[in-house]
Image: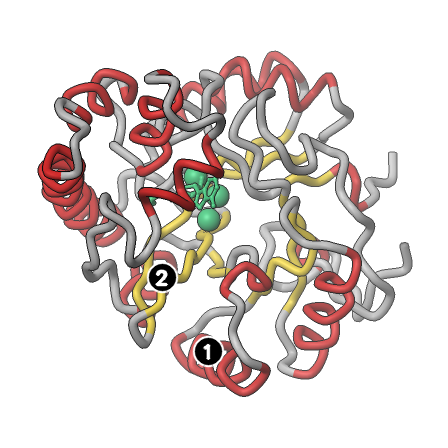
Amino acid sequence: MTLMSHNYDLHTHSIASDGTLTPTQLVEAAAAEGVRVLALTDHDSTAGIEEAQQAACRCQLSLVPGVEISVTWRGQVIHVLGLNVTPGVATLEDGLEKLRAYRDWRAQEMGRRLAAAGIPKAYEAAVGLAKGSIVSRTHFARYLVSLGRVPNVPAVFKQYLVRGKPGYVPGEWAPLEEAVDWILAAGGSAVIAHPARYKLTATKLRMLLGQFRECGGVGLEVVSGSHGVEDVQRMAEQARRLDLVASVGSDYHGPEHSWAGLGRLQPLPHGCVPIWSSEHWPNAVPRRASVI
Ligand code: AMP
Ligand code: MN
Ligand code: MN
Ligand code: MN
């Protein structure tokens, strides 16, 4: 069977980070949506991959082991996906471990700041919701929604968890070059996630992508669940110009998710080289540009 871009979803989350499905439930949901090649890309963790691999064998779906690494570039948070990484490689795992240590400190500091703003015990509640996985701002947001003060998760982010708001903690994630190095050390390919979400000027975006390429990065997530039609066209053009291969991912976090669900993504525009038919994919048959 020939796979089309809608059979690929190369950016998803499970309860190993801030998703709401277990890796098994995620794989089963993806298979039911017609996804044939699924990447599990939890934030700063590879903990869900083994379970996802086992479920994928049962569902006859191809599981791409991945990770979404938090990076700070010129004061801005950027997410870098590692696709086809080998979990357990020390360089990658040590790097992720450092990020998780920073995350733990940041979560405690968020708790202190929210307490000062009149919301006590948010740290304890977020840790409880994370159930032993990494603690994300998403867990804080879900707790604040449960208090009934704010209607939904995006509203909590806006009022409490973004720069300039009471629960926001400025800090430093991994440098871009280091994150790419960890991915390369683990045999993976590095892809810039949801590029339109950073709201960079054209000049700054080109600077980011140029630097990313120099570090060994190869891909741009042209199609993302959070990209509109124009974003996809703009990013397709950037990928072509900078000779980056194109990736496709929903950024699915669970069924209550507000943007495009698993497997329901826009097609990859003509002229993009899909990452899965490039030299950056294991056993790919290289192709110059997408014909879909
Ligand atoms: P963190 O890595 O802990 O800073 O949390 C980032 C995560 O929060 C992202 O991966 C999204 O899942 C979620 N997120 C970020 N911004 C928003 C927003 N405006 N609305 C809803 N979720 C968001
Ligand atoms: Mn997330
Ligand atoms: Mn992200
Ligand atoms: Mn994501």
Is residue 240 visible in this depiction of the protein? yes
In the rendered structure, the answer to whether residue 183 lies left or right of residue 192 reads left
Q: Disc number at residue 208? A: 1
- For the point 73% across and 17% down, the residue is 32
Q: Residue 39: percent from the left, percent from the top?
A: 55, 38
> As displayed, is residue 59 above or below residue 97?
above
Q: Residue 109: percent from the left, percent from the top?
A: 11, 42
Quadrant of the rendered image holding ligand 1: top left
Count of marks, rendered view: 2
Q: Residues within 10 Å of mark 2 (few under 14, many from 20)?
A: some
- For the point 74% across and 65% down, the residue is 273
Would you say the residues marked 2 and 1 are in contact, meaning their CB atoms lie under 8 Å apart? no
Structural distance between the alpha carbons of marks 2 and 1: 12 Å
In the rendered structure, the answer to whether residue 164 lies left or right of residue 12 reads left
Ligand 1 within 8 Å of disc 2? The answer is yes
In the rendered structure, the answer to whether residue 200 lies left or right of residue 230 reads left
Identity, as a three-letter code, of the amino acid under mark 2: Val
